[in-house]
Image: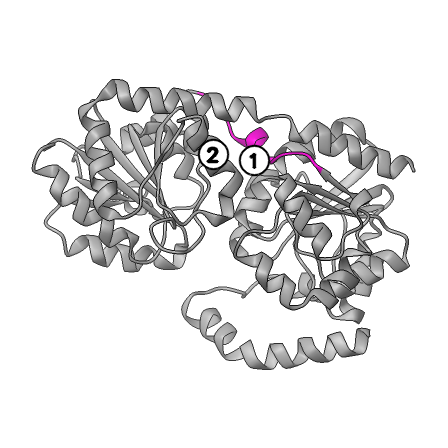
């Protein structure tokens, strides 16, 4: 079986290699971590027992924060190591944990490579954030009697049908997973349908409620206020945007400026490789414009009040959210699954998103049921919603307060998840 899987991987590598090479050259992606990806990983404290946490990208890495903190409390004699698949996930993990934890790129799931990784890491348990189950990974872990746990597990409406197409493979993998800690009962039932043992599936709610920072103050926000010369004028932030959405919000901004002359806006694209593309689009508008990267390097005077700010730096989105009066959460007006809407709602911001939020289904349902966010169906409705929020301060404040309450009411998944992990380790 392992040889068949490796052959399939090698064929896939050949097929996708032109795309990978293109991104390496023109988008500067996949250039680092080659030793990690081939299993050459050195732990910081090789004499200690270890916990291997794998988080695919930024969202999953962010969800590790409370789990890591809790595990440090209950298992202080263990070293925690964190792997990520993407460049952005790796960068986020490095920013979160600095040199405190070993951070590395997830090895290729080729049998010999993954065997080497397990030999070097020597994990006592593996925690996979949300899903990210690989056949050779689970086979080797099972062979070495290393428990595998899916933490904060979910199978979205988009990914579930794809997994059903390869049910024979998922059934083989899921049988080797020791515990599924699912965000919702719906996700739990999907894991079971794809082959997970029912007695190994537990609903814990989403960790992202616990990691959402409920606060009125974000470190670095005051500095950003000064850099952008923000004053009492209304400030709208479009965060985590995807292709075509920047055009939508620019058109809406144009309409809004006719009535709200002092309105300012920030656009923060989800992917760094789209920063220049978005900058070119904004430059074609009639508005004054500043790139945060240039502001930080003092190439743009902070005494000027640019109509539009492009957030083209990493790690500043939450600061933008904390300064906003109204937030639009991107990748939701186009069918991309949405971006994290918990961050702005936890910060007490009036939060708006589009209809395409299948990656955050449970969160969206909870927020809408608690009247803690606004869902719009198209750009026209987004214009109407932002306009209403600008005109009616009490309305937008009620939405913001309700959203913060929803976040509070759904917290507690971290403790429940770690309690179940401890039961498994004790067994």
Query: Does residue 336 lie above or below 207 as drawn?
Result: below
Q: Is residue 301 visible?
A: no
* Element type at mark 2: helix
Query: Does residue 283 lie above or below 392 as drawn?
Result: below
Of the numbered discs in the image, which one, if any, rests on residue 24?
A: none
Q: Is residue 208 magenta?
A: yes
Q: Are marks 1 and 2 in contact (CB under 8 Å)?
A: yes
Quarter placement of the C terminus: top right
Residue name at image x 29 percent, y 31 percent: 326
- Give the residue number, with chain letter if any, for mark 1: 208
* Element type at mark 1: helix
Residue name at image x 85 percent, y 38 percent: 424
Query: Does residue 228 lie above or below 268 as drawn?
Result: above
| Span highlighted in magenta in the image | 203-215
x then y, percent, for residue 407: 51, 26
Q: Is residue 260 visible?
A: yes
Residue name at image x 42 percent, y 29 percent: 345
The answer to which quarter of the image holds residue 385 is top left
Of the numbered discs in the image, which one, if any, rests on residue 342?
A: 2
Residue 196 lies left or right of residue 215; in this view the side is: right
Residue extending furthest toward the top: 394
x then y, percent, for residue 87: 53, 56
x then y, percent, for residue 191: 69, 51
Colouring chosen for the image of the structure: one colour
């Amino acid at each position: 079986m392992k040889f068949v899987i490796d052959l399939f991987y090698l064929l896939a590598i050949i097929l996708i290699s032109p795309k990978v090479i293109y991104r390496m050259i023109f988008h500067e992606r996949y250039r680092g971590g080659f030793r990690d990806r081939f299993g050459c990983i050195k732990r910081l404290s090789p004499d200690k027992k270890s916990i291997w946490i794998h988080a695919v990208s930024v969202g999953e890495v962010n969800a590790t924060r409370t789990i890591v903190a809790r595990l440090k409390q209950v298992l202080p004699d263990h070293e925690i190591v964190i792997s990520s698949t993407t460049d952005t996930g790796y960068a986020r993990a490095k920013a979160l944990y600095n040199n405190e934890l070993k951070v590395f790129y997830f090895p290729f799931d080729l049998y010999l490579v993954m065997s080497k990784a397990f030999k070097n890491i020597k994990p006592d348990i593996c925690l996979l954030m949300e899903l990210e189950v690989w056949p050779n990974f689970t086979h080797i872990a099972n062979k070495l009697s290393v428990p595998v746990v899916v933490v904060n597990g979910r199978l979205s409406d988009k990914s579930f049908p794809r997994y059903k197409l390869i049910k024979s493979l998922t059934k083989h993998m899921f049988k080797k997973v020791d515990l599924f800690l699912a965000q919702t009962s719906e996700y739990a039932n999907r894991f079971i349908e794809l082959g997970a043992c029912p007695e190994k599936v537990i609903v814990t709610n989403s960790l992202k409620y616990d990691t959402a920072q409920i606060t009125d103050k974000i470190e670095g926000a005051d500095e950003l206020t000064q850099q952008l010369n923000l004053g009492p004028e209304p400030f709208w932030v479009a965060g985590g945007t995807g292709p075509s959405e920047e055009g939508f919000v620019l058109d809406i901004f144009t309409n809004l400026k006719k009535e709200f002359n002092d309105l300012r806006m920030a656009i923060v694209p989800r992917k760094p490789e789209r920063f220049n593309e978005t900058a070119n689009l904004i430059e074609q508008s009639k508005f004054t414009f500043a790139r945060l990267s240039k502001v930080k390097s003092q190439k743009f005077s902070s005494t000027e009040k640019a109509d539009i700010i492009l957030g083209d730096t990493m790690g500043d989105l939450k600061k933008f959210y904390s300064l906003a009066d109204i937030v639009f959460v991107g990748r939701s007006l186009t069918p991309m699954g949405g971006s994290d809407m918990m961050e702005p709602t936890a910060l007490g911001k009036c939060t708006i998103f589009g209809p395409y939020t299948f990656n955050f289904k449970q969160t969206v349902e909870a927020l809408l049921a608690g009247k803690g966010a606004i869902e719009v169906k198209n750009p026209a409705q987004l214009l109407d919603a932002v306009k209403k929020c600008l005109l009616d301060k009490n309305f937008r404040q009620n939405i913001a307060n309700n959203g913060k309450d929803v976040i509070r009411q759904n917290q507690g998944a971290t403790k429940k998840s770690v309690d179940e992990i401890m039961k498994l380790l004790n067994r």
